Amino acid sequence: MYINNKWKHALLVSVCLSGSASAEDNLPGESRRSVVEEVIITATRREENLQEVGISASAFNGNQLEEMNASSAGDLAELSPNVEFKKQWGARGNSSLFYVRGVGQADFNEGSESPTTVYIDDFYIMSNSATDFLLYDVAGAEIMRGPQGALFGRNSTAGAVAVRNNQPSDELEGEIAAAIGNYDRKEFKGYFNIPVIADTLAIRFSGESEVHDGTTKNLYVGPGPGGGDTHEGDFQSARAIVKWTPSDTLSFNYKYQYGFAEGRNGGDSSQPMLTIPGDTVTVPADGFGYAPFRSGANSTHVISDGVNDFENEVDHHLATVNWDVGNAVTIKSITGYLDQSKYTLEDCDGTPRTICHAYNVVELDYWTQELRLSVDLNDARITVGGFYLDQDYENNWILPITSGTGTFQGHSSIEPEDTPGGLVQITPNTADLESYALYGNIAYDISEKVTLTGGLRWTDEERDFQQTEGLYVHDHPDTGTVSFQGNTFGILSLDRNGYRNFLANNVLGIVDPESDPEVDYRAVYEDDYFAYELSLQYLPNNELLLYGSFKHAVKSGGFNNGLVNFSSSKLDAIPFDNEENDAIEVGMKWSSSDSRVRLNAALFYYDYQDYQATAFSVENASLGVQVLNSDATVKGAEMELVANLADGFDLILGFGYVDTEVKDISKLTASGLDTADLELGQAPEFQTNGMLRYEVDLFNSGTLSNVLSFSYVGERYVDVLNDTAT
């Protein structure tokens, strides 16, 4: 048993059937475990020492992750400079977004892909809410900064996160761990490895459960199913892997993973916001007919009349074949399928009035096939591969814009004061994506000290998209009224079944502020393009590596989908173009002769053409999430220090800096259309992280590990519009 002093205030109790760490886990001549040890990464699609690969990366093996009590994607980000993991809602199993060097995709629609790609056991995780289900019983994790595409299945312009789960082995072993915390938090996790036939067949089972009560207090007391504390979670995940090794040169792996999550998960609007010409601000007073309710209150208190609820179910299958052909030639096949069903119900204004409720239903499935050939020669290492992706996606957002007595709009024959009702935005959309890619990479040793690497990628992509969008009149009666600051408002508070009834029986004719008809948009995006890269690394001695690289990366264009509403005069804003990134990076990696200290640092500069920037804007008096194409630059640096200061005493320290600029962003202000250069969303200028870990012997029969960790993320805007409230 050990007490973990990380700021999560959790008591973690573990029972390990496999015993304590082996001597190989320790530094030479030491008795206690350390997080400072050799780290093997697969960024080059081969197993290589982190310190011998010329890219900026943070990497951890399974032992290190366990010793640092890192068990989630968020923990990985907290241990890595210039990396942030943003949860759009509060609990695990919902929208989760990675940002590397300030670059990511803030659009929480599942049909939008991120420029920072995520891979679990070489399988591309396309959905932003499927990542959490696949991160337990991990053999290693690595975060690669900068464009990745000449060695990976899906191209990326910002970076890649790769996680390798533990595979079945020939040892009978297992582990059970439990944790408790505040908000009635309970966690259980464990694995069990069974060798069925020695050296031939083995099975590994892993599972994880995490539940906790709401962490945001909802002070609402009123009619309807609304109310209840939010940001509660119920997360379950289970995995089984079968490994069959019929010969020394051939192995087959089949993995099945199931995940289910649900809870009351409101969004981030814990204070009401108001859109004014050119800005979005927090409501100073009576902006929506009531005075601010958080004055002097705890920042985690809301008064939310709506239901905050979500449910997410994921099924995942993965088949991997590894074949050692001989003569330094290996072939790997990765075939994966993921099916996901999800709904989200959110009171997105966080107020006691029905200003913004959002109901979202998503059904998606996709499968990928990757085939990779690796050849290791005396002075050269060659990798070529092919990648295929096929996705079917259905999504529908239902957003009551206004509801309650006195807000009935768009029906001129009815007096507003006589009838409840309002406007509802409905945007059903579908997308079918098919993508083919070929990639290749060669690393050539010019000498014992100098290596030149080049890579090339070709991608062909077709995306069929259809969206019906519009504002409709609804006549759903108020579910009740709420009085606040002397005013009485009609409200519309519905649960999931209530929304189904609402759509079936209460949606009337189309209405639009600009008198446009309902928009039925159909289009096909089709393009093919090349990405390429060149890098040089130099080893002046056994302790130091110097490197530099140039990479031209491309991310495919697509269509604004989901929570957005366009008039028929603005349909050209629905599609967006490819983004291209010319990235320059120089760096160094140094290790002390006794391997106790590692210092890695990098400088970078990105020149983006048509960067896909996310804007939370208002189109046609309707809230929307829109991707805009604008040129941008990103420059900065990061540094990582890992040191074993004494027997059982470790230090990790990281620092990141970015400076971003997006060109010619237009905003409607009180004086008209204003165009200016603004910052990227979700791009803090400074980030830092650190950890101190001290391990002592405990009664000659175990160890007591104490971990103190911290992370700091600087102020940043939510999106590229740089509004005050965000």
Image (cartoon, rainbow, N blue to C red):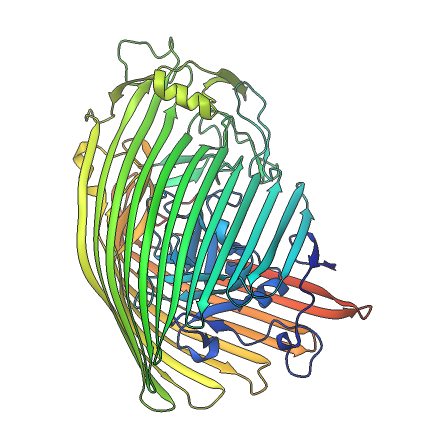
Residue 28 appears left or right of 167: right
Relative to 141, 434 lies left or right: left
Q: Is residue 39 left or right of residue 175?
A: left
Image spot of residue 373 (x, y percent):
31, 70
Q: Considering depth in this image, is 72 or 507 the residue closer to the camera?
A: 72
Q: Residue furthest right?
A: 699
Q: Quadrant of the C terminus?
A: top left
Front one among 394 and 244: 244
Which residue corresponds to the image point at 24% horizontal and 64% vertical from the top-left?
A: 438
- The image quadrant of residue 420 is top left
Can you give x and y, in whole percent of width and height, for residue 588 in the image?
43, 80
Q: Position of residue 364 (x, y in %)?
A: 35, 41
- Residue 279 or 367: which is nearer the viewer? 367
Decide which of 204, 132 is in the foreground and name it: 204
Task: Name the side, left or right, on which 449 lies relative to 438.
Answer: right
Residue 464 visible to the viewer: yes
Residue at image point 39% right, 47% down: 338
The N terminus: image quadrant: bottom right
Is residue 726 visible in this depiction of the protein?
no
The residue depicted at 40 percent of the width and 23 percent of the height is 500
User: Residue 635 appears at what percent x and percent y?
Assistant: 36, 67
* x 61%, y 36%: residue: 297
Q: Is residue 129 above or below residue 497?
A: below
